[in-house]
Amino acid sequence: MRRTLSTFNEVWQQQFRHRVLAQTQHFPEQTQFLIGCSGGMDSMLLLHLMSEIFPAQIRAIYIDHQLQQISAEWGALVQKQAEVLKIPCVIQKVQVATGNLEQQARQARYQAYQQHLQANEILVLAHHQQDQAETLLLRLFSGTGVNGLAAMQQIDVRQDLTIWRPFLALSREQIEQWAQQLGFDYVTDPTNHDTHYDRAWCREELWPVLQKRFPKMQAAVARTSYLMQDAAEILNDVFQEDWQHCATDNELDLIALSQLSAARQRQLLSAWIKAKDQYRPSYDMVQRLQQEVILAKPDAQATLHINQHYYVRYQKKLYRLTYDALYAEKQSPIANVSSQHYEIGQFVQVAAGKFRIESQTIGLAPKLLGRELHLIKRQGGEKIHLYGRVGHWPLKKAIQEAQILPWLRHTIQILVVDNVMLGVFSPKGFWLAQSDYVEHGGWQPGLISDCDDFSQQSFLHDE
């Protein structure tokens, strides 16, 4: 017969129940819980406790990494216990990629969680106080900053899922006593004691030495993680202000950046480079960006490749570009000459972006509508007489004055008819040229989205 919470130490029972109910007040009504259960003592205890407190709101999932022959039997044990507790259970096999086994297994596990999580579900994991302290130490050894030392949060709201860790304030000793009182079966994973893995080494080799010298070390280190979470929240408030002042997703104002302290500059650059990646760049990489690109000589065409992005400075701004955006001219060559026909209301896609043919007070003669016009790729050395300005001047100067970015200049095309320049398509719009074809009640192409908009929207969607 299944035991109930009344078999537990009464103080722990009341404290845990109160803490759990207080934490769930932050969740929307009708929230369901998906419990990640490995079959180990911690997660099996979590399964029992959640079945007592939220019997109608939970289901379990066992991720079979297929790294050990006995892993399928562990899944069967989880499923059997879930049936006893009347909890729906999912068994999901995953393939773990080669490389850092701990990291790749974790990535495969979380991908499986996300695959099964429903819109109203929160992922519940059995991480406890020692896990928290180990995480902080391991991140400290890797040279992390404040965000890394914040370690795991009790309620971790991410972009793609929310994780709840109700055991995070509990010691392993408390969990062991509860598990003994319940008397359920659980898995003992031999890799938890294999010191080849960093976490197991920390637990088996380093932990006893530290705890012998500092008996209250576990709680103290865990407390440090909570202090770092407060510090990270404060830093994030400062970062948000700096971001609003200096940055967009793919541009950074270097004049505004220079007005910040050195520490705030590094903080902003680190987060800006990270973007939507999982990890922040190393301290050395941030320094390289500062020294090799931001502080390079004004006439230097400095570019730094970090992960899948290229960082380029132009005038007083820093840009983050994909390979396709930076080398678009090589990726998609533009024909030297092409033909087009235009009608009012028509949408036109040219190299510089998307345009719409619109009626204007001043524009090109209506008789040109429907007629074959030619687009000529800019070769260099051309001159243009812009409508409303005096005399001809180099097209290059107009491009520079419009501050068209160097990697977009190849998209500029000249619209002509019978060797007469009608205007220029550019990422900043259509530039009407002075000619005999300019009339009142004419038409012009109006810019809808430039080529840079398209490339960045595609980049953000891919991420």
Image (cartoon, rainbow, N blue to C red):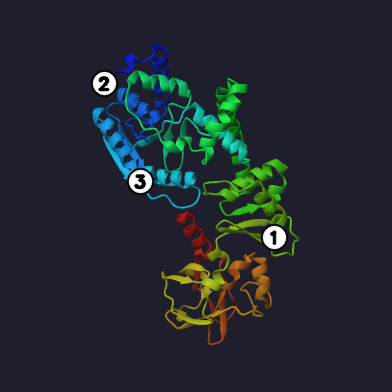
The residue that appears at 67% across and 80% down in the rendered structure is 381
Amino acid type assigned to the residue bearing label 1 in the image: Gln
Q: Earlier in the sequence, mark 3 or mark 1?
A: 3
Question: Can you identify the residue that label 1 sits on?
Answer: 315
Q: Position of residue 393 (x, y in %)?
A: 69, 76
The residue that appears at 30% across and 39% down in the rendered structure is 73
Q: Quadrant of the N terminus?
A: top left
Q: Earlier in the sequence, mark 2 or mark 1?
A: 2
Secondary structure of the residue carrying numbered label 1: loop
Q: Position of residue 352 (x, y in %)?
A: 53, 69
Residue 63 appears left or right of 418: left
> Height in image: 420 above or below 31?
below
Closer to the camera in the image, 220 or 34: 220
Residue density around tag 3, few if under 14, some if 14–19, many if 20 or more, within 10 Å = few
Q: How many numbered discs?
A: 3
In the image, farthest residue toward the bottom: 418
| Mark drawn on residue 115 | 3
Residue 17 appears left or right of 308: left
From the image, state whether disc 2 or disc 3 is nearer to you: 2
> Height in image: 164 above or below 318?
above
Closer to the camera in the image, 370 or 45: 45
